[in-house]
Image (cartoon, rainbow, N blue to C red):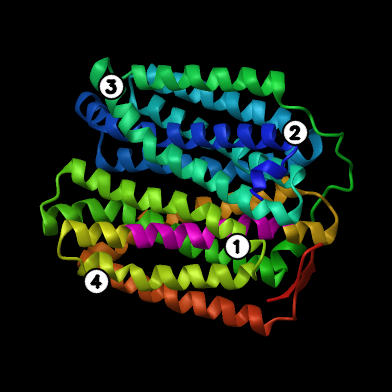
C-alpha cells in the first residue's frame, strides 16, 4: 500500500505545505542566477562583491538557524513558518527594487535569515506529524521539493526576465510567496501547545556518536556538491566546449537524479539500517566524482553528473528521518532544534565548498582537484563509519525494527 494512502488529512495537508514552502525557498535561491549578468553589467561589481553576494545567504542562515529552530519548539511550527515566509516575501521584493550592490547583498542576507526559519521548522513539522516508520519517505519527498525548486528557479527566472524585465521574476515569486502565506495562515492547523520539556541539551546531542556521524556525512556531501557548482562550468567550457545551455542541462541532470533518488532512499531508511545507507551513499559519491574529470563527451559527463547527484540524494535523505528518531529516543520532541543543527551543517557546506574549490583549483588543475576531493570523501567517509562502529553500541527501537549501527 502506498504511504500516501495511509496518511490522515492533517498529514497530507502538512506535507503539502512543507513541499510548497521548501520549493519556494529554493526557487527563490536559484532565481537570481540568470539575472546575475544584468546586475554585473549595470552595477559593475568586483568579483569580491559578487562572492559576498552569493555567500551572504549561507552566512545569514548559519547565524540565524540556531535561534529559530529552538524557538519553533516553544512557540509552534505554524507561527515560525509564517515568520519565515514573510521574510522570504520581503527579501524578494527587495531584490526587485535593488539598485545597488549593498541592497542586493542585504536582500540575499534577509533571504538566508528567512530560510533559517522555514527549513528546520518545516522538517520539524513533518517529524511532529508522522510516526518514525513513515518519516523516511516523507523526508525524502521534502528533499525532492528542494531539488525541484533549485532545478526550476533558474529557467523560470530567465524566461520571466526575457519576456519582461529584471524585476518580473522577483515580483512573480513574491506574489507566489504571499499566496503561500495566506494558505498557511488559513489552512495549516496549529499543533497542540508545546511544553517546556521540549528542550534539547545541544552539547549532549552533539556528543552523540550517531549525530557526529550524521554531521560528518552531511558536511562531506554538501561540501562536495557546493564545490562542484562554481568549478565545473569553467571546466566543461574548456574541456568540452560546452555552451551555457549545455552546462545548465548538465546541472539539471544532476539535480533531477538527486530529486528522484531521495524518496527512494528515505523509504529504504525505514526498513534498513540508515547509517549503512548513508555510508553507502558517501562511498558512491567518492567513487563517481572522478568520472566527472575522466568523461570525454557530453553524454559521458551527463551520466557522471546523474550518478553524482543520485549519490548525494541517497546520502542525505536518510539523515533527516534518523535525526528525528534520535530525538524520539530522548522523548523531548525538540525536532526544531535538531533540524536547525542539520541546517547549520548544510550551511557550513555551502560556505566551505566554494572556498575549498577555489583554493584547490588555484593549486591544481580542476580534474586533479576533483580526484583529490573524491579521495578525501572516501577517506573521511570510511573514517566516520569506523569511528561510529567503534563507539559504544547505539540502539534505537521503533514499532517495526531494532537496529545496531
Give the residue drawn at x 76%, y 27%: 189
The residue beneath circle 2 is 10
Q: Which residue is mark 4?
A: 368
Which numbered disc flags the more N-terminal residue, 4 or 2? Answer: 2
Residue at the spot 38% in from the left edge and 34% down from the top edge: 153
Distance from label 3 to label 4 (Cα)? 37 Å
Q: Nearer the viewer, residue 366 or 103?
A: 366
Element assignment for label 2: helix
Evaluate whether residue 328 shows in this view.
yes
313 within the magenta span? yes
Residue assigned mark 3: 161
* SS assignment for the magenta stretch, majority: helix
Element under label 4?
A: helix
Tell which residue pokes out farthest to the bottom in this image: 390
Mark 3 touching mark 1, by CB under 8 A? no
Q: Measured along the vertical axis of the image, is residue 157 above or below residue 294?
A: above
Q: Which residues are magenta?
A: 306-324
Amino acid at each position: 500500500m502506498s504511504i500516501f494512502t495511509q496518511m490522515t488529512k492533517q498529514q497530507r495537508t502538512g506535507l503539502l505545505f512543507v513541499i510548497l514552502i521548501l520549493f519556494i525557498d529554493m526557487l527563490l535561491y536559484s532565481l537570481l542566477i540568470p539575472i546575475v549578468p544584468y546586475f554585473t553589467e549595470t552595477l559593475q561589481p568586483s568579483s569580491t562583491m559578487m562572492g559576498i553576494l552569493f555567500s551572504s545567504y549561507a552566512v545569514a542562515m548559519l547565524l540565524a538557524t540556531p535561534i529559530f529552530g529552538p524557538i519553533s519548539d516553544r512557540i509552534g511550527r505554524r507561527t515560525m513558518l509564517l515568520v519565515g515566509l514573510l521574510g522570504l516575501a520581503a527579501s524578494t521584493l527587495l531584490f526587485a527594487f535593488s539598485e545597488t550592490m549593498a541592497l542586493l547583498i542585504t536582500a540575499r542576507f534577509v533571504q538566508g535569515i528567512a530560510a533559517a526559519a522555514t527549513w528546520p521548522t518545516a522538517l520539524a513539522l513533518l517529524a511532529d506529524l508522522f510516526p518514525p516508520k513513515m518519516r523516511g519517505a516523507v523526508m525524502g519527498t521534502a528533499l525532492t521539493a528542494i531539488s525541484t525548486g533549485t532545478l526550476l528557479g533558474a529557467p523560470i527566472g530567465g524566461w520571466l526576465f526575457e519576456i519582461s524585465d529584471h524585476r518580473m521574476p522577483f515580483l512573480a515569486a513574491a506574489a507566489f510567496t504571499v499566496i503561500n502565506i495566506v494558505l498557511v495562515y488559513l489552512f495549516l492547523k496549529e499543533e497542540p501547545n508545546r511544553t517546556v520539556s521540549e528542550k534539547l541539551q545541544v552539547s549532549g546531542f552533539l556528543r552523540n556518536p550517531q549525530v557526529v556521524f550524521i554531521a560528518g556525512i552531511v558536511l562531506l556531501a554538501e561540501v562536495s556538491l557546493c564545490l562542484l557548482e562554481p568549478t565545473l562550468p569553467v571546466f566543461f567550457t574548456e574541456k568540452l566546449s560546452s555552451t551555457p545551455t549545455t552546462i545548465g542541462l548538465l546541472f539539471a541532470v544532476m539535480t533531477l537524479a538527486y530529486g528522484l533518488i531521495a524518496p527512494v532512499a528515505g523509504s529504504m531508511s525505514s526498513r534498513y539500517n540508515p547509517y549503512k545507507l548513508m555510508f553507502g551513499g558517501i562511498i558512491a559519491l567518492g567513487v563517481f566524482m572522478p568520472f566527472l574529470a575522466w568523461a570525454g563527451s557530453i553524454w559521458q559527463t551527463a551520466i557522471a553528473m546523474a550518478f553524482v547527484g543520485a549519490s548525494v540524494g541517497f546520502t542525505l535523505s536518510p539523515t533527516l528521518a534518523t535525526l528525528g528518531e534520535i530525538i524520539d529516543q530522548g522523548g523531548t520532541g525538540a525536532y526544531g532544534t535538531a533540524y536547525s543543527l542539520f541546517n547549520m551543517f548544510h550551511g557550513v557546506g555551502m560556505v566551505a565548498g566554494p572556498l575549498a574549490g577555489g583554493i584547490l583549483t588555484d593549486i591544481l588543475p580542476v580534474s586533479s582537484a576533483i580526484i583529490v576531493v573524491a579521495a578525501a570523501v572516501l577517506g573521511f567517509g570510511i573514517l566516520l563509519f569506523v569511528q561510529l562502529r567503534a563507539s559504544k553500541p547505539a540502539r534505537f527501537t521503533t514499532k517495526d525494527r531494532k537496529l545496531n549501527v
